[in-house]
Every structure is written in structure tokens, then in C-alpha cells.
Amino acid sequence: MANKCAASDPWQDCMEVAVTIARKAGAVICDALRKEQTVQIKSSPADLVTETDQNVEKMIIGTLKEKFPSHSFIGEESVADGAASVLTDNPTWIIDPIDGTTNFVHRFPFVAVSIGFSVNKQSEIGIVYSCMEDKMYTAQRGQGAFCNGQQLKVSGQEDISKALIVTELGSNRTPEVLKTVLSNMEKLISIPSHGVRALGTAAVNMCMVATGGADAYYEMGIHCWDMAAATLIVSEAGGVVLDISGGPFDLMSRRVIVASSRAIAERIAKEVQIIPFQRDDQTE
């Protein structure tokens, strides 16, 4: 079976299949919200996983493998079970079945399916389906970003004192990490900026920047499956995607700044103290 279709848009077939499976996954998640969840703890009491995370990932990867047998996969729950998290030049799907598991457990209404697709280590497709809101964010490289078919554009704000910034406390609860996370927030609020928000899902946080509803998002300690889809959506909406240092973005680095303008992204990079985390592709 061919993995590509017409040369004019070689990944259109991939896009259509992925949007369909994201919608199907969202329906499974919304259905599961009505039932009691079995919750397990991963790396910390704030890092949770449910049976739904695992079942949804199996469903997504199973469907995509059937359609595209030569492609590679990186999935949050597969990696938790010991699979490698290495990005090669091969067409690769990078999947977070439920971004916002803690929200899901509490029925806080920001829960997303995130599906990114890279070829030659370059993002080609980004899909974030915020299923409780029924918002389907999509992007293909060079073709713009959309939410439910409406084209997205970042705010274009360049003045950080007029910016609404999104970030998270993260799941790491060690005192020194938490102290730096809070100190970074304090620095940005004290500029002063308009405020700081947290929706509990990295993918939806970034999509808020793509819509123009927020002006920047930064975080350290997240993973490639949190960022693969949404960083493309932001850049296709005209936004800037940088490393937390202000340098070029690296998907496996576990850190990111996305913003409505380079001026705001660079100001955040200048203000925040970097927290070191082991890279996603680093083996022990």
C-alpha cells in the first residue's frame, strides 16, 4: 500500500487519516469522562495516567500502523512502557493520547488529543483536538493553521507589558524545581505583564497563542509528544517558536517558548532561569 498520495501534497492522505482518528479518540475520551477512572501515578503524585490514556494510544497507533506500515511512532504511553523516544528521518507520528490527564481525571474541561507528524525531523502535520470543547486545531507545513476550518492568526503583540502569558506549574514537585518555576512566573508578572494563565495542557496552551487569545507560552519539563503538533500550529499561525534559551527550537529538548512575536519570545528567554531536564532522546 502506498504511504503517499499526489506529489503536489504528499501528506494529504496522512492529514485526513489523522484528523479522523483524532476525532474518534476524542469521542472515546468524552465517553470515558462519564465513567469512574482507574488512576495510576507515574513520576510524581502530580503525574497521572489512566486506562483511557493507554487504550486511546493503542487505538491511534493501531489505526495509523495499519494505514502506514513503514512509518515510525513515538507515543507517551509506549515510552512509559519502555519504548525508545528517538526521532529519525523516517516519517514519524508523535502522539499524546490525552494531553491534560489531570484535567481529565478532574473533568476540568481542557483535554486534548495531540498528533504530530515529522519527516526528515521536520514537522509536516499538527493536530490538536480539544475534545470537551469540540475544537479541532490543524496545521500542515506551509499551508496555515486552522480551528474547525477557520484560519488562525497570532495576536502580533510585541510589548510584553501588554501580554497575556500562559505557563504551567508542571508535575515535578521537588522543592528547588518548584521554587524556580514560581520565581520565573513572578519575574514575568512583575514586568508587569497583563497576567499569567494555565489551562493544564501544553497543547491547548500553545493553541491559545495560535488563536491570538494569549500572547506567549513557555514551559520546561514537557515532552516531544506535548509539543510536536502544537508548535507547528503556532508557527503556521504566524507565531514564533524558540528554545527557552532564545535559540532554535529542538523538539527533543523538553522546553519551549511560543509567542506572538520574536520580541516577546526573546524577552521571556531573557527573564527565565533554565531548569535542566534530561532530553527525550537521551538514553541512560
Image (cartoon, rainbow, N blue to C red):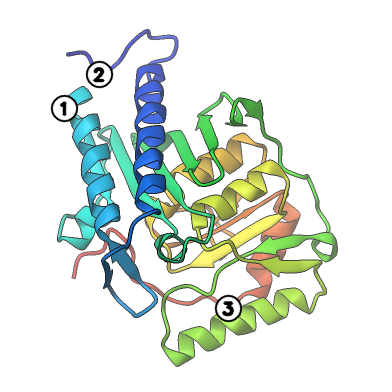
Q: What is the distance, in whole Å, between disc 2 and disc 3 at their CAs?
A: 43 Å
Residue receiving disc 2? 3
Residue receiving disc 3? 273
Q: What is the distance, in whole Å, between disc 3 and disc 1 at their CAs?
A: 43 Å
Residue receiving disc 1? 69
**Counting other residues with Cα less than 10 Å from the Cα at mark 1, is it few (<14), some (14-19), or many (20 or more)?**
few
Q: What is the distance, in whole Å, between disc 2 and disc 1 at their CAs?
A: 8 Å
**x%, y% of residue 92?**
29, 37
**Tag 2 secondary structure:** loop
Type of amino acid under label 2? Asn
Nearest to the observer: residue 161 or residue 211: 211
Residue farthest to the bottom, as pictured:
175
Q: Is residue 236 above or below residue 165?
A: above
Asked if the residues shown at circle 2 and circle 1 are in contact, with their CB atoms under 8 angstroms apart, the answer is yes
Judge from the rendering whether residue 61 lies leftward or rightward of residue 237; answer left or right: left
Q: Earlier in the sequence, mark 3 or mark 1?
A: 1
Type of amino acid under label 3? Gln
The N terminus is located in which quarter?
top left
Name the mark nearer the viewer: 2 or 3: 2
Name the residue: 24% across, 42% down.
73
Tell me the quarter of the picture where residue 199 sits: bottom right
**Tag 1 secondary structure:** loop
**Counting other residues with Cα less than 10 Å from the Cα at mark 2, is it few (<14), some (14-19), or many (20 or more)?**
some
Name the residue: 36% across, 34% down.
24
**x%, y% of residue 76?**
29, 55
Name the residue: 33% across, 79% down.
44
Judge from the rendering whether residue 186 lies leftward or rightward of residue 63; answer left or right: right
Q: Earlier in the sequence, mark 2 or mark 1?
A: 2
Type of amino acid under label 1? Pro
Residue 85 in view in this figure = no
